[in-house]
């Protein structure tokens, strides 16, 4: 899983464990959204002296209303996804809670880009 790889890389380069945990949580939430709603995605990790950025750029159906999708409890998960324990409507809110800055852009029929930014200092 990409979130596990991101976590491993950040640990190896000596990033604070509390920050690594926040990044792993939000990357995992994004990864699960990709699994449930997209065809494929590219996950990019950028580390600079002051900022860590994780970008998840997927090819999928897109999010019709990003503001609505950011609300706790809002979900478009199917019954099958819910039966597996997903789709509680907490994915994007959990991502937002664990980032210092979150930018979500989406184009219907093309996909969604999630930029998660974390301050190191």
Image (cartoon, grey):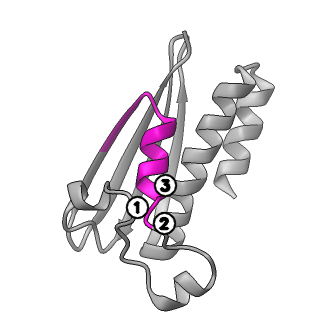
Q: What's the magenta region?
A: 89-103
Instruction: Look at the numbered disc 2 and give the secondary structure of its residue.
Output: helix
Distance between the alpha carbons at the discs numbered 2 and 3: 10 Å
For mark 2, does the 10 Å Cα neighbourhood hold few (<14), some (14 to 19), or many (20 or more) residues?
Answer: many
Tell me the CA gap for discs 3 and 1: 6 Å
98 falls in the magenta region: yes
Structural crowding at the residue carrying mark 3, measured as other residues with C-alpha within 10 Å and reported as few (<14), some (14–19) or many (≥20): few
Which is closer to the viewer, label 2 or label 1? 2
Q: Nearer the viewer, residue 9 or 102?
A: 102
As drawn, the label of residue 58 is: 1
> Which of the image's four quarters has the N terminus?
bottom right
Mark 3 lies on residue = 42
Seen from the viewer's position, the closer of residues 64 and 58 is: 64
Where in the figure is residue 112, as x and y percent of width and height?
A: 32, 59
41 to 100, vertically: above or below: below
Tell which residue pokes out farthest to the front in this image: 73
Q: Residue 106 sits in which quadrant?
A: bottom left
Which residue sits at x=74%, y=26%? 17
Query: Dot 1: what SS?
Result: strand
Badge 1: residue crowd in 10 Å (few <14, some 14–19, many ≥20): many
Quadrant position of the C terminus in the picture: top right
Identify the residue at horizontal 34%, vertical 67% (top origin).
Answer: 74
The residue carrying mark 2 is: 34
Examine the image and state in which quarter residue 24 appears. Answer: top right
Instruction: Tell me, yes or no, whether the two marked residues, 3 and 1, touch with CB atoms within 8 Å.
Output: yes
Image location (x, y in percent) of residue 60: 35, 72
**Looking at the image, do the residues carrying marks 2 and 3 touch, with CB atoms under 8 Å apart?**
no
């Amino acid at each position: 899983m990409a979130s596990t790889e991101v976590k491993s890389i950040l640990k190896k380069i000596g990033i604070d464990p509390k920050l690594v945990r926040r990044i792993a949580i939000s990357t995992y939430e994004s990864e699960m959204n990709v699994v449930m709603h997209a065809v494929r995605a590219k996950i990019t990790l950028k580390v600079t002296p002051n900022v860590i950025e994780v970008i998840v750029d997927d090819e999928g159906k897109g999010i019709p209303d990003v503001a609505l999708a950011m609300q706790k409890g809002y979900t478009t998960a199917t019954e099958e996804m819910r039966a597996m324990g997903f789709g509680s409507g907490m994915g994007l809110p959990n991502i937002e809670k664990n980032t210092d800055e979150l930018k979500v852009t989406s184009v219907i029929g093309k996909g969604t880009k999630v930029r998660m930014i974390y301050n190191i200092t």
